[in-house]
Image (spheres, rainbow, N blue to C red):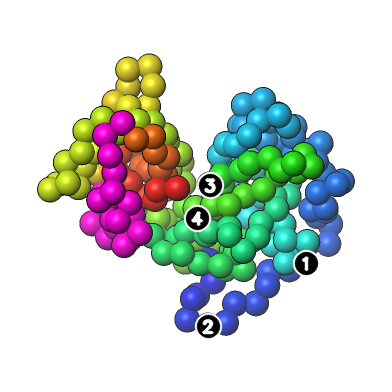
Amino acid sequence: MRAMQRALAPIAVLASLSFAACSNAAAIGDVLGGVLGGGAQAQSGQVAGTIAGVNTQSQQIGLTTSDGQTVGLLFDGNTKVVYQNQLYPVTALEKGDEVVMRVQTTQDGGYYTDSVLVTRSVTGGGSSSGGSANVQALQGTVRQIDRTNGLFALETGNGVVLTVSLPYNVTNADANRFRNLRTGEHVRIYGVYLNNSRVELRQFY
């Protein structure tokens, strides 16, 4: 991530990488199909990888996945970039940043991301969670809420119930979201497993 105290210049994409949606739609489907659970017909999912570049003209983020393939995902003014519980513009992304993206299909068969969680900054050298491998995208139904201790129980399916705790440096947005939680509500979060049944919240989304 680039330092937020100075102006952020758009990140140039390597000329050898093509992020045009019309030319790489099939490749994106091949790479992300399994993640999205059904290829081009899937509606949404999460994918992890490394930033290859950002093309502000075509509004695409280049993402290199774990198998070494680079794909382009559309973004717009609503796309959020989160690093260490703070929001940044897409242009703050740098080549080499490790991220987890929420991805959804567009009407014309392309792929769009509205949420980018930076798990490790290439320049900062730090991690928002102690390692990108620990960051998980989770969703489920709220079963119990302990507002005093900043905890809630999340049933993720198949009888699995996780205890989700707020971090000590929780953002105002996440704190407000927690205060408004209701039992029986379906929620989606990014979190870090502390053990088999305990997760620390990174972000509601």
Label 3: element kind: strand
Residue 156: name its quadrant. Answer: top left
Front residue (pair 97, 92): 92
Residue 113 in view (yes/no)? yes
Please tell me which of labels 1 and 3 falls first in the chain: 1
Asked whether, in this view, residue 148 is left or right of residue 156, the answer is left
Number of the label disc, if any, that sits on residue 6: 2
Label 4: element kind: strand
Which residue is found at the position 58% from the left and 52% from the top?
114
Label 1: element kind: loop
- Which residue appears farthest toward the top when viewing the image? 158
Gap between marks 1 and 4, in whole Å?
A: 22 Å
Q: Position of residue 83 (x, y in %)?
A: 45, 60
**Amino acid at circle 3:** Val
Please tell me which of labels 1 and 2 falls first in the chain: 2
Residue under numbered circle 4: 118
Q: Nearer the viewer, mark 1 or mark 2?
A: 1
Residue under numbered circle 1: 57
